[in-house]
Amino acid sequence: MNVPDKILTFVKLGGSVITDKNREATAHFDVICRLAQEIAHSRSARPQLQLVVGHGSGSFGHFVGKRYSTHLGLPGGGGWEGYAQTGAAALRLNRIVTDGFLESGVPVVSLQPSASAQCRNGTLVSLAVRPVQELLVAGMVPLVFGDVALDETLGFTIISTETIFGYLAGHLAPARILLVGIVDGVYTADPLIHPGACLIPEITSGNIAELEHVLGDSYGVDVTGGMFSKIRQMHGLVKAHPGLQIQVISGMRPGLLEAALCDPEMPIGTLIRD
């Protein structure tokens, strides 16, 4: 249902960029607005660009989710109160992101994943796609986010933005996915802790297995899996969708997101391919 001659790109703004993941419920509104302005500029420079934007829960949903063990569902979690509190925290951050984007001239429409998501034993099995499709046709920018979800087996769980992107990719066939984090790409260790860590320019079927022991948890509190689980998920996407390009880049370098959106061939960050 994409508009002909349009180029669809998914952009995820990581929780580490738009919040302080070590301080609960602390948003970086200035960074949110700067990234939104870069997206606005790229849309003006490339009218054929279609965007679906997603964001992580950062120090909003992850802190509350960890407190209640919401990601474990009813068997090991903190009950339905945890589900409600985690979802509410994710929505609070989404409201901040939505306001920042609208103030910056990006016509986002927030779509709450938990309103339609259905999981089975932690796996997302259904999600409303038509609202995303219709908003894209209308020239709007659908905005999704990491959220809680009902689960047929567990009662409830948490779904990451990467999981949502993976589901949408099967229906919308994006050309690119940009994962915008706090550092310049994927490293051999956390460069915020280990200054000697080396950037990994490409992740492919040939080297992903050997990276498992060097890629650990995400920086800060994260209940949706460590860095390797997210990279493995993205690599599975490029294998399932030939031609899909995924890049991990920094959101802390002003102008870099805009440049990446305007030039798909720009050799920056970490490229994930088959």
Image (cartoon, rainbow, N blue to C red):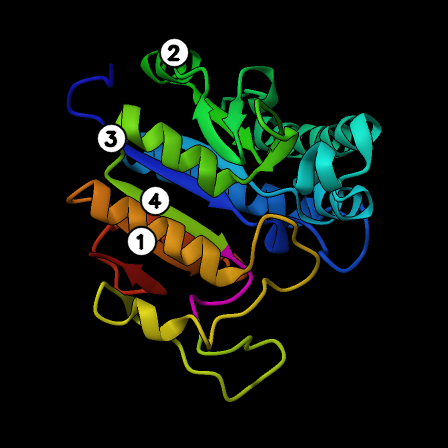
The magenta segment is: 181-186
Question: Is residue 40 something one can see in this rendering?
Answer: no
Q: Using residue 236 as the reference point, say whether residue 17 is left or right of it.
A: right
Q: Quadrant of residue 132?
A: top left
The rendered magenta stretch, by its main secondary structure, is classed as: loop
The amino acid type, in three-letter code, at marker 2 is Arg
Q: Residues within 10 Å of mark 2 (few under 14, many from 20)?
A: few
Q: Is residue 109 magenta?
A: no
Give the vertical position of 242 relative to 119 (above or below): below
Question: Tag on residue 173?
Answer: 3
Label of residue 235 in the image: 1
Image location of residue 6, percent across then percent down: 21, 26
Q: Which residue is labeled 2 in the image?
A: 130
Q: Is residue 261 left or right of residue 115?
A: left
Q: How far is disc 1 from disc 4 in space, using C-alphas? A: 11 Å
- In this view, the residue farthest toward the bottom is 196
> Is 177 situated left or right of 121 in this image?
left
Label 1 environment density (alpha carbons within 10 Å; few <14, some 14–19, many ≥20): many
Q: CA distance from mark 2 to mark 3?
A: 14 Å
Quickly name the residue at label 4.
Answer: 177
Single out the mark in the foreground, 3 or 1: 1
* Labels 4 and 3 touching (C-beta < 8 A): no
Badge 3 or badge 1: first in the primary sequence: 3
Mark 4, residues whose alpha carbon is within 10 Å: few (<14), some, or many (≥20)?
Answer: many
* Dot 4 amino acid type: Ile
Q: Secondary structure at mark 1?
A: helix
Dot 4 lies on which element? strand
How far is mark 4 from mark 3, CA to CA?
Answer: 10 Å
SS type, badge 2: helix
Could you tell me residue 210's position as x and y percent? 34, 75
Q: How many marks?
A: 4
Q: Earlier in the sequence, mark 2 or mark 3?
A: 2
